[in-house]
Amino acid sequence: MQKIGLIAIWISFGLWGVVGIVSISSLSISQKAISIPILLLVSEIAFWLGVVLVGKTVADHYREQLNPRRLWVVIKMFWQRWF
């Protein structure tokens, strides 16, 4: 069940990328206005379904790994190492 939950969480992240692609695509404004909220809603549902399936400990681990403060430290370390 945890693998299915992780897949659902990653699908939700992927749908956010699709939202970005749809927003710059050649679709009409009305098509964008319909598809973007639907994609966001499906993304949120997939994310929370995934969180329920993986459990609290795994969700806390991913929350810690995706913390913006931690990501900023990793980016700074990368920058200092290579530049």
Image (cartoon, grey):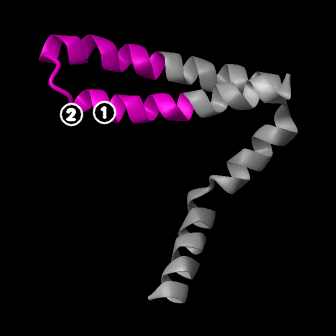
Place of residue 45 in the rendered image (x, y in percent of width and height, measured from the top left):
59, 17
Q: Position of 61 compared to 69: left or right? A: right
Q: Are marks 2 and 1 in contact (CB under 8 Å)?
A: yes
Place of residue 1 in the rendered image (x, y in percent of width and height, measured from the top left):
85, 22
Q: Quadrant of residue 65?
A: bottom right
Q: Is residue 32 magenta?
A: yes
| Above or below, comparing residue 76 to residue 9 in the picture | below
Where, quadrant-wise, is the C terminus in this rendering? Answer: bottom left
Q: Which residue is mark 1?
A: 21
Q: Is residue 17 magenta?
A: yes
Mark 2 neighbour class, 10 Å CA radius: few under 14, some 14 to 19, many 20 or more? few
Residue type (three-letter) at the residue carrying disc 2: Ile
What residue range appears in magenta? 12-41
Q: Which residue is mark 2?
A: 24
Residue type (three-letter) at the residue carrying disc 1: Ile
| Disc 2/disc 1 C-alpha distance (Å) | 6 Å
Place of residue 75 in the rendered image (x, y in percent of width and height, measured from the top left):
52, 72
Place of residue 40 in the rendered image (x, y in percent of width and height, measured from the top left):
44, 22
